[in-house]
Amino acid sequence: MSLILKLFFFAVSLSPTALLMGWDGHLTWTLLDGVGLSLTLTPLAAFFLLLLALAAPLVALPMLRRPADWPSLALYAALLAGMQLLLLAGDFVSFFIGWEIMTWSSYLLLLRSPRTEMATSQSYILFNLASAFLLLAGIMVFYGLTGSFDIRPLVGPTQPQQLALALLFGLAFLIKVGTLPLHIWVPRSYDEAPDIFSAFLSAAISKMGVYGMILLLTLFPEALTGLYGRLLNGPAAGYLLAWVGVITAIVATYKAISQEDMKRLLAYSSIAQVGYITTAVGVGSSLALGGALYLALVHTLVKLLLFISVAGIVLQTGQRRFNDLGRLIERMPISFFGVLIGIIGLAGMPPLPGFAAKYLVFVSLVDARWLLLLAAMILSSTAAFIYCYKLIYAPFLGHANSAGAREAKEAPWPYLVPQVILMALLFGLGVFPGFAIEVLIDPVLTALRMAPLGGSSWAVLTTAYGGYDGVVLMSVFVTAFVLVTGLFLLLRGRMRRAGSPYDLSYAGEVPTEETPLHYGAGMGRELRRIPLVGWILRHSSQGFYLGLTRQMRAAAGLLGGFYAGNPQTWILLAVVVFAVVLGLQAVTGGI
Amino acid sequence: MHAILDSLAMIGVSYIMGFLFYGFYRQLNARVQRRWGPSIWQNFFDNMKFFFKSETLVHGPMFFFGPMIIMAGAFTTVLFVPFLKDSNWLQGYSQYGNLILIIYLLVVGPLGNALAVGSSGNPFGVMGVTRGLTRLMGLEVPFFLGLGLVMLQHETTSVHAIMAAQDGLAHWGIVTNPIAFCVILLPFIASQNGSPFDVVGAPVEVYAGPRVEFGGRLLGVLMTQNMMMSIAKLVLVTDLFLGGATNILVLILKAFALFVLTTAVSMVFPRLRTEQAVDFFWKVPLGLGVLGVILTVWLPWSA
Amino acid sequence: MYHKTQREGFQCEGSQCEQALLETGSPVDEARQGVLDQLVSWMRKRSLFVLAYGTGCGAIEMRPLMTSRFDAERFGIIGAATPRQADVLVISGYLAIKTLKRVIRSYEQMQEPKYVIALGSCTINGGMYWDSYNTVKQVDRYLPVDIFINGCMPRPEALIEGFVALQERIARGEKGGFHRYRENIDWYKANQRRVLGDQMPPAYTYDWYHAGGAA
């Protein structure tokens, strides 16, 4: 029975794939008079549906491991249904319904984790509800402008109308992707969610915000340019959005470096990566949007890989802090390669596709003449190397610091299969950087009436600014590696394996198990001595929200003062209000 | 066949130039300190000595493969930097790459080696790696901004195209875009591990930094890649700012001039701490870079 | 001549044995070298990375050796930061029991071929610390010394001469002290154990000496 249910669940997790393969045409369904649901699959939605189709079964597989948590599985199925509805939506009613299903089922899934604290779940639902209400308000404004719920470009909107829409929708989607002042629900919930579900939160759900942002651009006839004209060689409104994204990326990167918990580090790194995507959306050219979509694809793959690997580590060792892990490379080699490929992709190193994505964004920034943004983006993308290194050093290298880390075994196969698949995908996309461009991204760009980026073959990535050839790069590197290793082994002389992990050159001393040798947790602590970084790390948006809370409380207290227990005061108030209203009406001549 | 010969030639040229340049540096440094100094071949002797060490200690497979990755990274970098312009030779695979790719390739190897350092489990090594990554974070911002100015000037990321555009002394990058050259000069010294930004290896100070556990032939590999990588960077800057070179002698001359310029800075300044170095990069070269951006992009007369 | 190139005969126990060694003299290994070996030896000679172990007063003589006045770098001699990278261990002056442990550890971490230069009289017979309760008198009993440079203190000139003598030995392809250490590891370890007692470094630091043959 349970097996059949599990198979059924797995089949459900494949439904986005089926939808992607099988969907053609258009479905409408009238709810009320003049208001109906219409389901259709635009190329843009199809791209994000593909991300969902990648993520859903790979996350479902480890979730099925015994003991299966049936409520989680049911909620996951509901979540998938909601997200598919969201992506298929051809009108804002079904978009909103999908959005709400996604919000609530992910919230309930978050609560399935025993680690979730009250503050986390509250901030999650609060921010997501705020996002939903902003979305609702935006939909109402949209309806007021067009008289229809269908998602289609506005015809001749005025600037205030565009601004209202951009603000309401933009804030709603920025909350979902978690850019800077609106991010505080992200690290907590990614950290405390069930380990596997964090992968889905980061890989798939945050992409819905990206989908929303790009969808928003399609509502305006001239995208962001129509709002405030152009600045240098790009949209002026986008310049602001791009800075929001870059500052998010910088701050989140430094926060990530200073974390001592694996999942929290990954959560901050998610914020940073989505910050890049926001920047690219802000640039808005065909290069930049291609880069944004590419980044979204790579981020989905990488974060799935990393969160699943980390979930495997947590499962096998019972530890999640960097202090308590170490030297798992010998005990969990496949997970090691998973994290290795993951961080190479995350850091945007060639030859993995992270580089191709970043390359497109960098070139688009040069093309837009926004060089200061380029410098800021380089700052965060180089600082990312530090947390990437921490992520692989602290769990896998160095010295084992707890009994769990000393005795761990390789993660079970439901964790390894997705990792291997994702590694293969990342590797393949890296060798053929043009494949993703030509097959996945160009249809979207064409549908958005932008110039496609496709090159002469899948092996090359070409832009007007020059490109590179992934196959040549990979083969040169591999040949060099084989050649170097071969030549090295040909040299005469003995190679000797150290007799113990403690056989270290340690100023003549013989370190023991008690010697604090693991540098992982402290890594990045010395960064605080750099003025700028120290400033960033000393401040947090928590203070802003605490202040906001205080102000709200004070306002509520002031208001509450009117509702004293004394009925005479109430009556007096009622009379005064009545008199004022009457007076006002008399003055304005209403009566 | 041509490609193989060409690749081997590039690797050979960069290695020979590498140890001769560094030998010259040690000689010059000694003269500045009123010493005789070692012979110009000293780096070659040191390197060969390490390759012929009869014993090499490894701390596990990753420790062994780290130096192999960094060496493969150095080979790849060298092969993706065009050494000559208007020539069939010493091109490697540079037509398949671009400037941004080369900048990232410069980092691939050291990151691979960082894994080896980590797997040795020596905290001093990891401390060195962290210093290196922190310095990288500092230097890369102005460095990339300077290169961004160059990419903007020529509207391409192709090193070949940038080289081809500098067809006379008046069109050299250093003449047409002096701000960019000034912006990248100091970060360039840091990326060459030169003083005052040599806190990563910090010779004799922090127990050798990332190389603390490497000895024997593995250390020889690390030395070799360091020399080759330095030459790759020198040639890259020559290509971008000094008009490239049409034959190998001109290339050596130009790269050598640049090398002397950087060593002249290196020789007289004492070492900065990591955070001082980063702060310096974010104030002086980056400030200059921002000024350059304002002058070339923001002001009304600029394109 | 400030240096001695011949080992002092602490190789075997008992006075007869020592006497026998003194009479025969130590056999100089006139190893026949092929062209490649000669080349390798020459490279090794030209490049000596020095790990200066300076707890004794002799360390003060190492600084002028490296700096402008005497400039050891012209011989290819340069300081190394860690034992892993070093070729020559310079034990400068007396060793306390405590420091002996660290010296042994450092020596064992060096990669072969590796050489030891013992600096000053204290390393030969305890020097002015001949009756100290915690000073090691004869370093050669615990580590295979290649070159002794006597004097209290030997001047940098003497050090340079010692280094040059070591270079000549390397160039001739003679077997270094590390061969002796490898072949007689049990003898050395027994001596070390006698002094260090339960302070001996753990077995993994040296048991690989038993595993393989000579390089």
Image (spheres, helix red, strand yellow):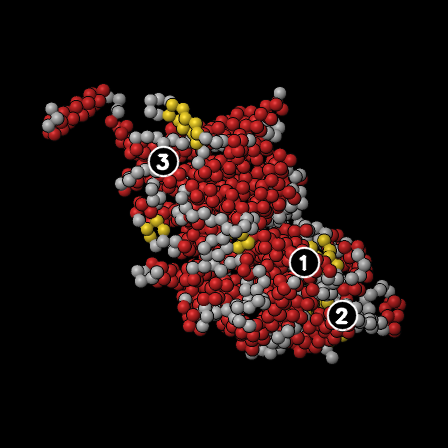
Q: Nearest to the eye among marks 2 and 1: give it.
A: 1
What is the x, y in percent for residue B181?
Answer: 44, 66
Left or right for B203, reference A285: right
Which amino acid, mark 3?
Answer: Arg
Judged from the image, the secondary structure of the residue bearing numbered disc 2 is helix
Which part of the image, by quadrant, shows the N terminus of chain A?
A: top right
Q: Is residue C104 visible?
A: no
Give me the C-alpha separation between circle 3 and circle 2: 79 Å
Q: Any mark on residue B274, and which?
A: none
Q: Any mark on residue A483, and which?
A: 1
Judged from the image, the secondary structure of the residue bearing numbered disc 3 is loop
Chain that bears disc 1: A
- Residue toward you, B122 or A338: A338
What is the x, y in percent for residue A277?
Answer: 44, 45
Which amino acid, mark 2?
Answer: Leu
What is the x, y in percent for residue B265?
Answer: 49, 70
Up/down of A345 relative to A4, above or below: below
Which part of the image, by quadrant, shows the C terminus of chain A?
A: top left
Chain that bears disc 3: A
Q: Is residue A581 visible?
A: yes
Left or right for B49, reference C22: left
Q: Are marks 3 and 1 in contact (CB under 8 Å)?
A: no
Residue named by callout 3:
A152
